[in-house]
Amino acid sequence: MGKKGDISFVITNHVIRYSEKRSNSKGVGDHVGEVELPLGIIEKGIIKDKKNLKLFITDLVQRYKWEGKKVTFTLPSELAHLYQLYHSKVKDRESLLIVNQWSKDIHNHGQQRETSNLLIYSYYLHHIQSYTSLLNQSKVRAIRADVAPQAVYRLYQERVSYIPSDVLVVYWNKDVLTMTTYYLGQPVYTKHWHIESTTYSPGLFKKYYIEMLSNQETIAFGQVVLSGDVAYLSEIYTEIKENIRSPIYVYGNQFVPTKFMDVIGVAMW
């Protein structure tokens, strides 16, 4: 769990969400906010305009007096991969930075998957170096990378008393949808889709959901966790309810909107 004074960033193609720990309690006393990024600064996860991205981050650092503070951050979610720990076919293993995302929930189910089959999150090293370098140049200390869908799952873990074995996380932002399935607290499958439309078309969730199911083993979920920053999140909720007979967890209230679920989850690590 983050300590008082620590900073968290969730970086997407269109926004930087931030959180400052103002107490040592879990998710309590956090100062959260966001700054919109103009089109063209980050595209499909890749920094295209380092100069202006640095200006936006530096402005945040100076505004809130974060110089020298430790920062945990995420890259845009489409850059995160699930990597098989020991038997991966990825040839350039040395170019991967493994994100240590062992779930606290893993030992609570009374059973575990084979260690050799564990899937863990990773980023390619050259991607993470570009963000780390820019953050450090902005006078904060980038100490570790997180993954946004995992942060959403982490906050869900902290908020519920019972966690079923199979959970689906639907993380729907303005330009990217990521669906991640969890089994016994571990991520087992993730898929990204780039979203171009700013309006919701009926049947869109069902289309992506069927595509996701065709590529992995789980066909039933004990829980769906929904998060994201699209304006039509309520329409997605309705369509999930129509297609999946499972309870849906959505974090948020009048003080902290649902879209901040990711950055609050990062702050809990």
Image (spheres, rainbow, N blue to C red):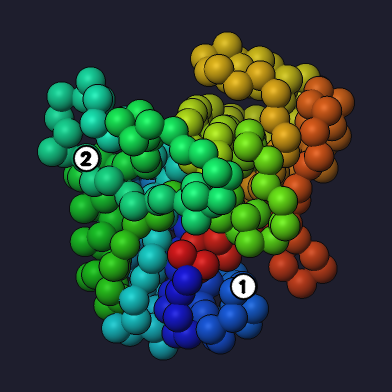
**Mark closest to the chain's N terminus, 1 or 2:** 1
Task: Work out whether 130 lies above or below 24.
Answer: above
Near-viewer residue (192 or 85): 85
The image position of residue 185, as x and y in percent, is 54, 44
* Displayed quadrant of residue 93: top left
Please give the residue where the numbered disc 1 appears in the rendered image. 27
Badge 2 crowding class, 10 Å Cα cut-off, few under 14, some 14 to 19, many 20 or more, is some
Q: Is residue 215 visible?
A: yes
Q: Which mark is residue 8?
A: none
The image position of residue 33, as x and y in percent, is 59, 70
Q: Residue at x 66, y 15 (%)?
A: 210
Task: Work out whether 214 lies above or below 15.
Answer: above
Q: Amino acid at mark 1?
A: Gly
Q: Is residue 63 visible?
A: no
Badge 1 crowding class, 10 Å Cα cut-off, few under 14, some 14 to 19, many 20 or more, is many
Q: Residue at x 27, y 46 (%)?
A: 98
Please give the residue where the numbered disc 2 appears in the rendered image. 96
Toward the top, the furthest residue is 214
The image position of residue 203, as x and y in percent, is 77, 19
Task: Work out whether 130 lies above or below 225.
Answer: below
